[in-house]
Amino acid sequence: MAGKKRKSLFLIVKPYLFLIPIYLLLVIFKYIPFGMAVQKSFFNWNGGNMNIFIGFQNYLEAFSDKIFLESLLTVFKVLIVYVLIVVTVPLLTAELLFAVKSAKIQYVVRTAFTFPMVVPGVVIILLWKWILAGDTGVLNSILNSVGLSNLVRPWLGNSQTALWSILAIGFPWLGMASLGGMQFLIYFGALQSIPKDLFEAGQLDGANIVKRFIHIDLPMLATQIKLMVTLAIISSLQIFDSIYILTRGGPGTSTMVPAVYLYEQGFTYKRMGYSSALGILLFIIIMILTVLNNKFLKSTDTMD
């Protein structure tokens, strides 16, 4: 009897044993570093021999750090653009493709849109760096060739255009997983999963394409839109690679964002404690915005 109980208990526990390696990796590479960052944010720590407890001084400095505050303003501009992108271009593209009746054409177009997603993001960024280059850039060469020389400028070297040039990378934003490619696939898959009875009922009620989009498609895609907005918030506030590769926060501080700034503070100026405090503040901001998004954006199953 005891042997059967032990065997049944083992069968219950067995599936969870396979999760142990995953949780170990999470603890080692996620939770322990995060805990260390929280601890070191209260220290004047250079990553080596200097480790002096200073309480909340790093946080107080952050709230009076002009560059950090400017970087927050810059990253909120990025956030607004990212959110606008993920709820417009991928959604409208998915709607247009869904309206195509031929399954073969849908497959070809879907593949064409998503194939660039396999290209590493760094390669795409470097390609756009070449396109936006001031002297020999493709964009300026095209402008010169069509007689629009007055529009030629150093796109990444001008404080007025640098940030917007970076945000334009990936246009029309369907070839990057972070800005359109993944969103397009999720929207298109969600459209395909909508019961056809709803479309037929809409046709019987005389709903045209616009009314169908507003009253059927959008409510049924509410969960996906909510998820995409959440991911856009997180990815925008954590933006690093494109800024660092293209401008490193310049010219001046016109494209400085918190992720690049805390990286510089930690690895260039060896202020790891202050860098940790900036990272914790960024984490808190992301958490607040994510909670607000989940609170105010409805999901499909909560709509009336």
Image (spheres, grey):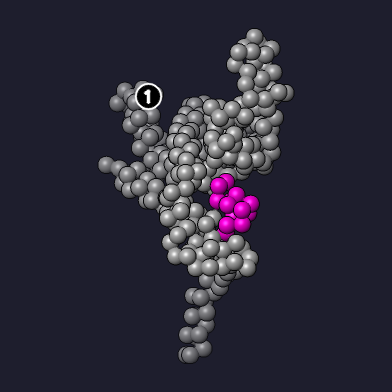
**Could you tell me residue 298's position as x and y percent?**
33, 44
- Relative to 31, say whether 163 is above or below: above
Name the residue at 47% across, 48% down: 65
Segment tinted magenta in the rendering? 260-272
Name the residue at 56% across, 68% down: 51
Name the residue at 35% across, 30% down: 214
Residue farthest toward the bottom in the current orientation of the protein: 2
**Residue type at the position of mark 1:** Val
**Looking at the image, which is closer to me, 80 or 257?**
257
**Looking at the image, which is closer to me, 18 or 157?**
157
- Relative to 202, say whether 17 is above or below: below
Name the residue at 51% across, 75% down: 13
Per the picture, the main secondary structure of the magenta-coloured stretch is helix
**Could you tell me residue 190's position as x and y percent?**
46, 40
**Looking at the image, which is closer to me, 197 or 116?**
116
Residue farthest toward the left in the current orientation of the protein: 304
**Looking at the image, which is closer to me, 69 or 2?**
69
Residue ID for mark 1: 210
Q: Quadrant of residue 159?
A: top right
Q: Quadrant of residue 275?
A: bottom right
Which quarter of the image is occupied by the C terminus? top left
From this viewpoint, is residue 250 visible?
yes
Residue 264 belongs to the span the image colors magenta: yes
Please tell me whether mark 1 sits on a helix, a strand or a loop. helix
Disc 1: CA contacts within 10 A as few (<14), some (14-19) or many (>=20) = few
Residue farthest toward the right in the current orientation of the protein: 136
Q: Quadrant of residue 103?
A: top right
**Could you tell me residue 153's position as x and y percent?**
62, 21
**Could you tell me residue 11's position as x and y percent?**
52, 76
